[in-house]
């Protein structure tokens, strides 16, 4: 009887853990699915640099500016139906050389949009 109860409890716990884990995601990915902003640990990651370069290039296209990307100072990402990036970007060729950029990226739908690109006055 005790063995049957133990097996039943274990089966229940395994089923609960699997259901809670959104189809096999790690616990960290499970937390990230909640939609909150998470700090980008490696701001020199090639994907982050690509997103930052895109933001500067797109801003230049939209405004006629001639900013040049220097580096990512810090960033956050948010998992949605794709990824939102908020990057603090250092540029050159401007009196205001630090910008706050928001980019939405959804690679599987081939969508990338610059949402916001505004100067940061006090960094």
Image: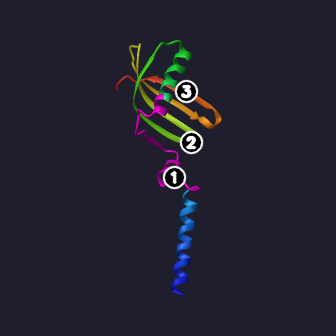
> What residue is at 51 percent from the left and 52 percent from the top?
30
The first of marks 2 and 3 along the sequence is 2
Q: Earlier in the sequence, mark 2 or mark 1?
A: 1
User: Separation of disc 2 and disc 1 at Cα?
Assistant: 13 Å
Labelled pair 3, 1 in contact (Cβ < 8 Å): no
Q: Quadrant of the C terminus?
A: top left
Span shown in magenta: 22-49
Q: CA distance from mark 3 to mark 1?
A: 27 Å
**Label 3 Cα neighbours within 10 Å, binned few <14 / some 14-19 / many ≥20:** many
Membership of 36 in magenta stretch? yes
Label 3 vs 1, first from the N-terminus: 1
Check disc 1 and report its element: helix, strand or loop.
Answer: helix
- Residue at position x 56%, y 33% from top? 104
Q: Residue furthest left?
A: 123
Observer-nearest of 4 and 34: 4
Where does residue 3 sit, x and y in percent of width and height?
52, 83
Q: Position of residue 2 (x, y in %)?
A: 51, 85
Q: Which residue is mark 3?
A: 114
Q: Position of residue 106 (x, y in %)?
A: 59, 36
Q: Is residue 52 above or below residue 32?
A: above
User: How many neighbours does mark 2 have within 10 angstroms: few (below 14), some (14-19), or many (20 or more)?
Assistant: some
SS class of the residue under badge 2?
Answer: strand
Vertical comparison of 74 with 2: above or below:
above
Query: How packed is label 1: few (under 14 Cα within 10 Å), some, or many (20 or more)?
Result: some
- Residue 30, which numbered label? 1
User: Dots 2 and 3: beta carbons under 8 Å?
Assistant: no
Contact check, label 2 and label 1, Cβ < 8 Å: no
- Which residue is drawn at the image coordinates 45% and 31% (left, top)? 87
Residue position for label 2: 80
């Amino acid at each position: 009887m005790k063995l049957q109860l133990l097996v039943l409890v274990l089966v229940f716990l395994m089923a609960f853990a699997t259901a809670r884990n959104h189809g096999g995601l790690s616990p960290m990915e499970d937390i990230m699915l909640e939609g909150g902003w998470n700090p980008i640990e490696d701001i020199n990651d090639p994907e982050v640099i690509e997103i930052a370069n895109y933001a500067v290039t797109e801003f230049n296209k939209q405004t006629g500016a001639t900013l040049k990307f220097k580096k990512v100072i810090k960033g956050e990402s948010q998992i949605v139906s794709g990824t939102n990036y908020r990057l603090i970007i250092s540029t050159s060729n401007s009196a205001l050389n630090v910008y706050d950029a928001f980019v939405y990226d959804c690679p599987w739908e081939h969508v990338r949009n610059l949402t916001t690109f505004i100067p940061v006055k006090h960094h």
